[in-house]
Image (cartoon, rainbow, N blue to C red):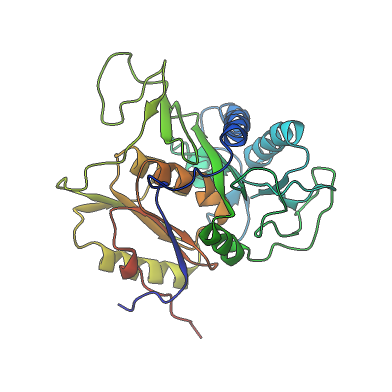
C-alpha cells in the first residue's frame, strides 16, 4: 500500500501558548448562528413521519435527494442570511452564493447528511453547519472564499460559476494562521443530540435522551452541555468508522484501503453520515474515522468538533482526498490510483 503523496492538513485543537483562534466575541456570535441554523434544518427533518420517504436520484443509484434536503437547506440559509447578510454560503443542494458586499466569512452547510439513512428510516442523519473565516475577526475576504455558482439562486447576491476547489487555498490560509474553521454545529433530531464547537472553546454535546444524573460513555445531559474529550487511546477493541462512495471503482479503492487500515482495530462501523462519524469520534463512541472522497460540507462542522475534543484531524486539500480523525496513522492512508 503506497503512502498518500497528496497534501494534507493535520490539525488538532489549539495548543497552549498559541494565540487564541479567532476574536472570542465574534466566534461565539458565529457559534450562536450555527446552532440556530442547524436547529432550523433539524426541525424540518423532524417532520419526517413513518415509512419510506420519496427521493430523487442525483448522481447514481443510492445517491438521493429529497424535498426535506431542499427545505432544510432553505431553513438554514434563512437563519444565516438574517443574522449574517454579508456572509457567503455554500450548501449541498443550492451551491454557492456570494453577497454583494462579502464579509470574508463563508458558511458550509449540509442540510441532511445521511440522506440514504433518512429515506429508509435509519436514525443516523443530521443537519451540519460550519463557518470559515478570518481568525482575528472581520477583515479581508478569506483565501478560500471563492466565487462559485449555485445550482439555483435561493438568495439575493452575486452567484458565480460552478464551484472550484478552494481546499488548497483554505489549507494554506489555515497554515498561515490567517483563517480557519471558527464555529460549527451538528443537530441530529432522531437521536436527540446536538454537537457544537467554537475554535478554542472546546467541543460540546447536549443529549436530550440522557437521564439527568445518570452516567454514560458520552456523558451528555438533557439539561446541560457536556464537554467532549474523545475516547481512551489505549482502550482495547477499537472501532474504526468509514464510508463508501457510489462509483464502483471508488468503492473498490476504499475497500482495499480499509483492509490496510484495520490492523490495530477490532472492527469497523459504517454509520452512513460523515458528520456523525466525526461527532462519535469526538464523544468517544468510536475511536477513529477515515473516508476518501467526502465533500467539504460533509466534514466542515464535524472536523472542528473532533479537533476541539482534542483529537488529531486530517482535512483534505484535494478533491477527492482523505478526511480523518482520531487515533489513526494518517500516513498510512493510500493514494487513489488513476483508472483507465
Total number of numbered discs in the rendering: 0
Name the residue: 53% across, 50% down.
298
Nearer to us in this view, 200 or 168: 200
Q: Choose top left, top right, bottom left or bottom right for residue 313.
A: bottom left
Q: Is residue 340 above or below residue 91?
A: below
Q: Which quadrant, please, contains the N terminus?
A: bottom left
Name the residue: 33% across, 13% down.
212
Nearer to us in this view, 19 or 331: 19
Q: Is residue 100 above or below residue 26?
A: below
Report whether 213 appears left or right of 75.
left
Q: Is residue 20 above or below residue 40?
A: below
Name the residue: 44% across, 42% down.
305
Q: Residue furthest bottom?
A: 340
Q: Choose top left, top right, bottom left or bottom right for residue 256.
A: bottom left
Report whether 214 appears left or right of 14.
left
Q: Residue furthest front?
A: 17
Name the residue: 47% across, 71% down.
7
**Residue 2 image offset from top left, x and y in percent:** 33, 79
**Residue 224 image offset from top left, x and y in percent:** 41, 18
Report whether 62 appears left or right of 37.
left
**Residue 300 image offset from top left, x and y in percent:** 53, 49
Q: Residue furthest left?
A: 236
**Residue 50 image offset from top left, x and y in percent:** 51, 28
Kindly tell me whether residue 323 is visible in this rendering: yes
Kindly tell me whether residue 93 is visible in this rendering: no
Amino acid at each position: 500500500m503506497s503512502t498518500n503523496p497528496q497534501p494534507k492538513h493535520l490539525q488538532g485543537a489549539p495548543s497552549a501558548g498559541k494565540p487564541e483562534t479567532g476574536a472570542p466575541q465574534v466566534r461565539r456570535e458565529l457559534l450562536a448562528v450555527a446552532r440556530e441554523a442547524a436547529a432550523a434544518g433539524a426541525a424540518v427533518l423532524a417532520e419526517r413521519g413513518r415509512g419510506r420517504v420519496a427521493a430523487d436520484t442525483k448522481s447514481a443509484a443510492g445517491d438521493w435527494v429529497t424535498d426535506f434536503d431542499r427545505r432544510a437547506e432553505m431553513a438554514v440559509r434563512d437563519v444565516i442570511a438574517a443574522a449574517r447578510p454579508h456572509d457567503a454560503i455554500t450548501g449541498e443542494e443550492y451551491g454557492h452564493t456570494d453577497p454583494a458586499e462579502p464579509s470574508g466569512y463563508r458558511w458550509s452547510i449540509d442540510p441532511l447528511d445521511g440522506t440514504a439513512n433518512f429515506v429508509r428510516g435509519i436514525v443516523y442523519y443530521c443537519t451540519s453547519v460550519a463557518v470559515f473565516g478570518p481568525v482575528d475577526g472581520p477583515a479581508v475576504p478569506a483565501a478560500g472564499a471563492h466565487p462559485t455558482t449555485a445550482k439555483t439562486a435561493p438568495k439575493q447576491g452575486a452567484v458565480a460559476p460552478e464551484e472550484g476547489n478552494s481546499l488548497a487555498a483554505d489549507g494554506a490560509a489555515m497554515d498561515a494562521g490567517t483563517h480557519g474553521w471558527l464555529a460549527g454545529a451538528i443537530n441530529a433530531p432522531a437521536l436527540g443530540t446536538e454537537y457544537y464547537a467554537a475554535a478554542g472553546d472546546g467541543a460540546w454535546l447536549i443529549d436530550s435522551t440522557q437521564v439527568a444524573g445518570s452516567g454514560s460513555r458520552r456523558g451528555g445531559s438533557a439539561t446541560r452541555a457536556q464537554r467532549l474529550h474523545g475516547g481512551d487511546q489505549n482502550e482495547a477493541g477499537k472501532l474504526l468508522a468509514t464510508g463508501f462512495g457510489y462509483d464502483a471503482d471508488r468503492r473498490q479503492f476504499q475497500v482495499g484501503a480499509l483492509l490496510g487500515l484495520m490492523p490495530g482495530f477490532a472492527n469497523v462501523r459504517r454509520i452512513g453520515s460523515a458528520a456523525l462519524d466525526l461527532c462519535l469520534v469526538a464523544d468517544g463512541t468510536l475511536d477513529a474515522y477515515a473516508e476518501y472522497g467526502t465533500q467539504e460540507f460533509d466534514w466542515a462542522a464535524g472536523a472542528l468538533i473532533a479537533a476541539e475534543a482534542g483529537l488529531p484531524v486530517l482535512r483534505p486539500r484535494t478533491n477527492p482526498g482523505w478526511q480523518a480523525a482520531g487515533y489513526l496513522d494518517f500516513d498510512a492512508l493510500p493514494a487513489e490510483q488513476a483508472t483507465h
